[in-house]
Image (cartoon, rainbow, N blue to C red):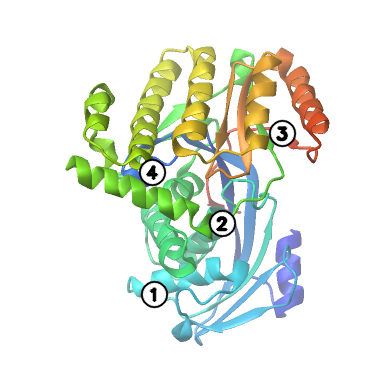
């Protein structure tokens, strides 16, 4: 394995083991995870792979085959939140979070390589965090469960890196199952593996990477999270998950701030869309999921206002070419969209999206099928 061989070249000995964790794409349920709501992600075949050896001298050495620069060397006792560090902040943050939780992680040598596109809204950061957490859990015999590892990885991103993300990405990377979508309740981290074999139904889910890079640390994500929390306080609920969709009009009438009202409308309605999609999948009515995706995109575009012209164009062009439905996925402001299509029309839809981008003067998008893959694992 190249990652193991590269580790040996870098550090002078073979690694103790090699682990992998996938990126994810979210079918439905956006910005619901930090509102204690429901989400429905699936793991992608794209992974971050880590070759790791344990150290007991307090030294943490990190190297990425995908980033410029050499080995980043840190002391585990000297790790400080929000101290910068680029890509290395993510695995370093995991070490910090584990130690802050009382787990005796005394150092490691780490070499990383990833096929998860960065900045595409496919959770490259969560894959990096989860693969590090799983490797250290195994090497130090910590005995942590997958949800516990996901929570610690989320803490690394929230408190060490400084991105106020929810827990969906880390849970999808840690817990997803091949051939399934993960129906996750982000309040208690209970989940159900939902069979999602699109090929058997003559369907495909395309991921369209707009090539527009997004950065969730720029304040827009945090502003929406704060607005959602303000809405929950104004409505007297623990989180917006506690507002029933049937009572949404009455709840909106109680909110004076127009921006908060829009955010609340999106979160409550998108939470309901997850429930509706699950019901459709359980009933074998997968084709009927398409319009729900498009409805979700309109909510993200108009109420949450996290789309961009390129994402809107994917949805418009795909649906005009015969897709069953489409929506942006992930944090927005760029990144990717998902498109539900019949397999017999997938090529035509992809060509239509590429032509629309060319006509608009945009860079050619990356398009690939999302095949539900396995979660984090030791190789």
Which residue occupies 39% across, 77% down?
Answer: 104
Mark 1, Cα crowd under 10 Å, few <14 / some 14-19 / many 20+, is: some
Q: Earlier in the sequence, mark 4 or mark 1?
A: 4
Q: Nearer the viewer, mark 1 or mark 3?
A: 3
Mark 2, Cα crowd under 10 Å, few <14 / some 14-19 / many 20+, is: many
Could you tell me how far apart the alpha carbons at marks 4 and 3 are, in whole angstroms? 26 Å
Let me know if residue 27 appears in the view: no
Which residue occupies 39% across, 66% down?
Answer: 142
Q: Is 107 rendered above or below residue 138?
A: below
Q: Position of residue 80 (x, y in %)?
A: 45, 79
Q: Nearer the viewer, residue 360 or 108?
A: 360
Could you tell me how far apart the alpha carbons at marks 1 and 2 are, in whole angstroms? 20 Å
Mark 3, Cα crowd under 10 Å, few <14 / some 14-19 / many 20+, is: some
Could you tell me how far apart the alpha carbons at marks 2 and 3 are, in whole angstroms? 20 Å
Q: Quadrant of residue 24?
A: top right
Q: Quadrant of residue 314?
A: top right
Q: Earlier in the sequence, mark 1 or mark 2?
A: 1
Residue position marked by numbered label 2 in the rendering: 125
Q: Nearer the viewer, mark 1 or mark 2?
A: 2
Residue position marked by numbered label 3 in the rendering: 368
Could you tell me how far apart the alpha carbons at marks 2 and 4 are, in whole angstroms? 16 Å
Q: Which mark is residue 99?
A: 1
Residue position marked by numbered label 4 in the rendering: 33
Drawn side of residue 229 relative to residue 317, left or right: left
Q: Is 213 rendered above or below residue 85?
A: above
Q: Earlier in the sequence, mark 4 or mark 3?
A: 4
Could you tell me how far apart the alpha carbons at marks 1 and 3 are, in whole angstroms? 39 Å
Q: State the SS at label 2.
A: helix
Which of the image's four quarters has the C terminus? bottom right
Q: Nearer the viewer, residue 79 or 250?
A: 250
């Amino acid at each position: 394995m190249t990652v193991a061989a590269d580790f040996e070249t870098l550090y002078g000995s073979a690694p103790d083991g090699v682990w992998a964790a996938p990126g994810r794409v979210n079918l439905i349920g956006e910005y619901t995870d930090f509102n204690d709501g429901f989400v429905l992600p699936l793991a992608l075949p794209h992974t971050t792979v880590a070759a790791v050896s344990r150290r007991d001298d307090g030294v943490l050495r990190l190297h990425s085959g995908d980033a410029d620069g050499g080995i980043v060397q840190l002391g585990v006792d000297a790790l400080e939140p929000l101290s910068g560090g680029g890509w290395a902040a993510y695995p370093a943050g995991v070490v910090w979070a584990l130690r802050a939780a009382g787990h005796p992680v005394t150092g490691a040598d780490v070499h990383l390589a990833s096929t998860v596109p960065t900045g595409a809204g496919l959770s490259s950061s969560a894959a990096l965090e989860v693969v590090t957490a799983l490797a250290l859990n195994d090497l130090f015999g910590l005995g942590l469960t997958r949800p516990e590892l996901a929570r610690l990885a989320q803490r690394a991103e929230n408190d060490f890196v400084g991105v106020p993300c929810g827990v969906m990405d880390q849970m999808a990377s840690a817990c997803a199952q091949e051939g399934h979508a993960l129906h996750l309740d982000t309040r208690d981290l209970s989940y159900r593996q939902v069979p999602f074999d699109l090929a058997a139904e003559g369907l495909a889910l395309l991921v369209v990477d707009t090539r527009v890079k997004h950065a969730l640390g720029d304040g827009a994500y945090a502003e929406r999270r704060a607005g959602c929390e303000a809405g929950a306080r104004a409505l007297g609920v623990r989180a917006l998950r506690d507002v029933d969709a049937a009572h949404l009009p009455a709840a909106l009438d109680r909110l004076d701030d127009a921006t908060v009202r829009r955010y609340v409308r999106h979160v409550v309605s998108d939470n309901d869309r997850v429930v509706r999609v699950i019901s459709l999948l359980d009933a074998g009515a997968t084709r009927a999921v398409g319009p729900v995706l498009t409805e979700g995109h309109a909510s993200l575009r108009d109420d949450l206002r996290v789309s961009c012209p390129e994402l809107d164009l994917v949805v418009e062009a795909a649906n005009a070419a015969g897709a069953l439905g489409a929506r942006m996925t992930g944090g927005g402001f760029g990144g990717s969209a998902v498109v539900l299509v019949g397999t017999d029309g997938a090529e035509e839809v992809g060509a239509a999206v590429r032509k629309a981008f060319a006509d608009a003067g945009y860079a050619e998008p990356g398009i690939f099928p999302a095949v539900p893959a396995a979660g984090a694992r030791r190789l």
